[in-house]
Amino acid sequence: MGANLAANYVQAVAMVLFVIGFANLLLQKNLLKKIIGFNIMDSGTYLFLADMGYIKGRVAPIVTDGIQEVERYINPIPSGLVLTGIVVSVSVTALMLSLTVRLYKRYHSLDLDEISMLIKKEKGV
C-alpha cells in the first residue's frame, strides 16, 4: 500500500482536499465557510483532473519542432476541462458571495440556522 500511495500521492492529496471541502460544506453553518469549503472541493477536483491528464515525458500539444506524432504530446482535453471548470467555479463563487451579501443585509447573520429561523418567523410558521 505504501508504494501505491507514494506513486499516486497527487491523487491522494486531491481526494483529501475533496473530502475536506465536502465536510466543510456539510458541517459548517456559516455561509462564508461553506463557500470556502466548496472552493476547496473544486480545487481537489481540478488537481485530480490535471494529474490524470498528465503523462510523464510528454509535452503540451503545441507543434514547434515539426514533430506530429501523437505519442509525444499529452491529451489536451483534461487541461481544457480544468480551465473551463475554473472559470465556472469563479462565476459560481461570485454568485454565491453576492447572494450571501444580500442575505446578510436582510437578516444580519451568516448562520444558516438563524436565517432559516428568521424566514420561518417572517412567514408565520
Image (cartoon, helix red, strand yellow):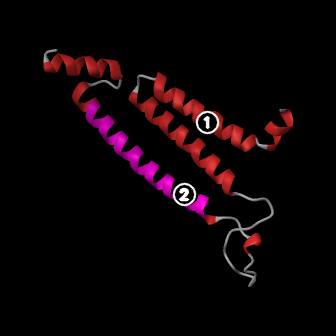
Circles 2 and 1, Cβ within 8 Å, touching? The answer is no
Residue at screen point 30% across, 18% down: 114
Amino acid at pointer 1:
Leu
Residue at screen point 72% across, 80% down: 68
Estimate the x, y position of residue 42 in percent, counting from the top left. Answer: 53, 43
- Left or right? Give the position of 95 relative to 83: left
Instruction: Report crowding for label 2: few under 14, some 14 to 19, many 20 or more residues within 10 A (C-alpha).
Output: some
> Extreme right residue here?
3
Amino acid at pointer 2:
Leu
Q: Residue 81: give its label.
A: 2
Q: Residue 17: give its label.
A: 1
Residue at screen point 62% across, 51% down: 49
Q: Residue 30: give its label.
A: none
- Tell which of 65 and 36 is nearer to you: 65
* Residue range (magenta): 77-103
Rendered view: 33 above or below 124: below
Quadrant in which residue 106 is drawn: top left
Rendered view: 21 above or below 77: above
Estimate the x, y position of residue 112 in percent, counting from the top left. Answer: 34, 23
Q: Secondary structure at mark 1?
A: helix
Q: Judge whether residue 114 is colored magenta.
A: no
Residue at screen point 47% across, 25% down: 26
Instruction: Report crowding for label 1: few under 14, some 14 to 19, many 20 or more residues within 10 A (C-alpha).
Output: many
